[in-house]
Every structure is written in structure tokens, then in C-alpha cells.
Amino acid sequence: MKTLEHIDQNQFVCEYAGEIITYKEAKKRAKGLSGVTGQYIIVLREHQTGNQVLRTHIDSQLHGNVARFINHSCCPNLFMTAVRVNSIIPRLALFAAVDIEEGEELCFDYAGNGYEYTCDGQSKNEVSKFTDIKIRKTPCLCEKSNCRTYLPFDSKLFCAESDF
């Protein structure tokens, strides 16, 4: 998706809207996802005290907005941040990471922080330990010099409960 006008750095662009779903539902839906479906479940991880992680799963397939058409890039011009407005449920806001010129494609890093995690929280470099997990990795098409080859994913959606 390309912008029709100049966007200043740090300017709000749009909300990433979607259906807030449970972990159990996210695992169920993740089984049907692939590069062919063109759908993606965003998993927001918020780290709290005591090594607690609050996970929110957002699926834009059935209830989304224009943001679901914004592509991934390993070198994005947008960044996503969680915002709470009169609710404990986060809303995902996309802002310009840099000045974006008219006609440029809008993109954000689906991982947010640039990492994907395996069942036990290891880095993506150790994902090969989990060869028994049938994860359909989707190739990244950003063609940037720092491209990570595949779209980031949360492999916990593909793991058995006993793996973590």
C-alpha cells in the first residue's frame, strides 16, 4: 500500500485493527495460515514484572481495516506501538519511523522488535531444534540488505503445550 501524501516522521498513520482472540483460538487459526492465505496473526508481547508476559492476539482476517494491507519489511518506514485508551485492551497504532514521501510503499516489521521466538523462548537461530513442529514459514519479499529471509512468527502458536 502506497501513501498518497507526505507523512512526517513520528506522525500517526493508522490503527492496526483486528479481532482480539484467545491464545487457544489463535493456535487453532494459525494452523490454517500460510503465505498463500495472505493473513497474519499479530502477537503483542508486553513484559511485566516477575518475568510475566502478557500476550494479546490480533487477527485482522474477519474484522480489520486498511492496515492489514500494509506489507512487512525488515527495514520498515512505520513502527507499531500499543496504546490503551480507557481500556485494558491495547490498540495497535502505526506511526512513521522516518519521513515518508508521497508514493512510497508503507511497511512495518511484523516482529516489531525484530525477533521471532521458538517454543522455549530461544532465538530464531535455534529454531532448527524443533524440526518436528510443522511450521509453514513464509518467505520475506522485502529484498532489503538486512532481510531475515522469512516473515517473523510466534512459534508458540504451533507448539504443544508441553513445549513451554
Image: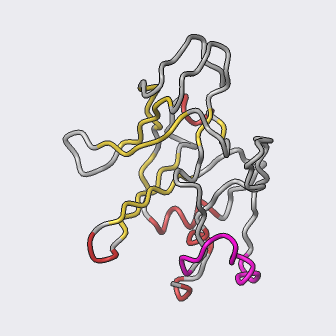
What colour scheme governs how the chains and residues are painted in the rendered image of this protein?
Answer: secondary structure
Residue under the point 69% across and 53% down: 151
Residue 156 location (% of width, % of height): 56, 72
Residue 81 location (% of width, % of height): 41, 43
Residue under the point 54% across and 34% down: 78
Residue lying at the far bottom of the rendered structure? 162
Question: Is 128 one of the magenta-colored residues?
Answer: yes
- Residue 30 appears in which quarter of the rendering? bottom right
Residue 102 location (% of width, % of height): 62, 12
Residue under the point 41% across and 51% down: 20
Q: Is residue 48 left or right of residue 40?
A: left
- Residue 143 appears in which quarter of the rendering? top right
Residue 18 location (% of width, % of height): 47, 42
The N terminus: image quadrant? top right
Residue under the point 67% across and 21% down: 104
- Give the magenta part as a residue range: 120-133
Question: Is 110 one of the magenta-colored residues?
Answer: no
Q: Is residue 51 left or right of residue 5?
A: left
Q: Is residue 91 above or below residue 105?
A: below
Q: Is residue 109 above or below residue 93?
A: below
Q: Is residue 130 above or below residue 153?
A: below
Count the marks: how many?
Answer: 0
Residue lying at the far left of the rendered structure? 86
